[in-house]
Image: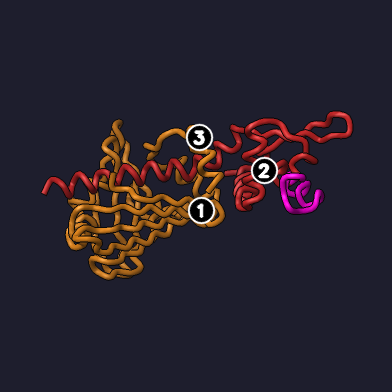
Amino acid sequence: MPVTDVTQDMDTRTLTITAEFAAPVERVWQVYADPRQLEQVWGPPTHPATFVEHELTPGTRCTYYMTAPDGQRYGGWWQITEVDAAYRLTFDDGFADAELNPVDTAPVSHNVYTFEEVDGGTRAVYVSTYDSAEALQQVLDMGVVEGSRLAIDQIDGLLAA
Amino acid sequence: MDGTSEDRADALFHALADRTRRDILRRVLAGEHSVSSLAASYDMSFAAVQKHVAVLECAGLLTKRRRGREQLASGDVEAVRSVASMLTELEGIWRGRIDRIDALLEEN
């Protein structure tokens, strides 16, 4: 399994996921740099993503939408804040309306992706932070949820952390 | 979103941000405990433990009832599930993405 570590910080509403991929850093970066590849991984199979605007340059806004099985489109945007090609990408991720304009009242997550070489492969660390517990709840209410339901032993594991 | 649900989410996250409170919650989720027996488990005053219990109670994670001179506390599993599941649902989305990246990288 590529995921090697998951940390949930309830106090800062931050999710940190570490994964290791059997591919060089430059190859993993391409997944993000090439919108056609990014589309294959961003949305779940039931809600494929389409990137309309995409450029990984600080200050640039990327736009995308995900299409639900009933044809309904859900818009989103990335505001790119920092780029160190192949190694680091930071951006804010939010919701957009039908014309792909940002919805100001919707929550925004702050994302820091870092990639480093490990034994010829790549260790990726994804950090995603929400400004408030309510924002986190809102994202899950609005967003595409493919997550698994929580079992009682997972609750215990989380509380023990 | 109304203010009530926002306040409630804040209270939940605040209550769970403390290690002692998480430990108390783990105990009362497993079964009812008297506040005095909980207090005996920690190297802190009865008043301090009572305060932690009150924070958990305000957040709706724990309920108290009286039996004679004792206060008995028990955990509310559903309330815990609601807060923990927010981060876990998000984790599920991420795990899906990572699996798809892995599959894409294996293709070529």
The image quarter in which residue A116 lies? bottom left
Q: Earlier in the sequence, mark 3 or mark 1?
A: 1
Label 1 sits on residue: A9
Chain letter for the residue marked with disc 2 in the picture: B
Who's orange, chain-wise?
A: A
State the residue at coordinates (21%, 55%). Answer: A31
Residue B62 image offset from top left, x and y in percent: 69, 37
Marks 3 and 1 in Cβ contact (< 8 Å): no
Q: Are marks 3 and 2 on the same chain?
A: no
When the figure is inspected, residue A142 is found, relative to residue A100, above or below; the finding is above
- Identify the residue at horizontal 45%, vertical 42% (top origin): B88
Region in magenta: B40-54
Whether residue B103 can be seen here: yes
Q: Which residue is mark 2?
A: B24
Of residues B84 and A130, the one nearer the viewer is B84
Name the residue beneath numbered marker 3: A153
Position in image of residue A44 (x %, y %): 29, 40
The answer to whether A128 appears left or right of A43 in the picture is right
Q: Which mark is residue B19?
A: none
Chain the render paints red: B
Q: Chain of mark 3?
A: A
Please state which amino acid type lies under the numbered disc 2: Ile
Q: Residue B57's image quarter?
A: top right
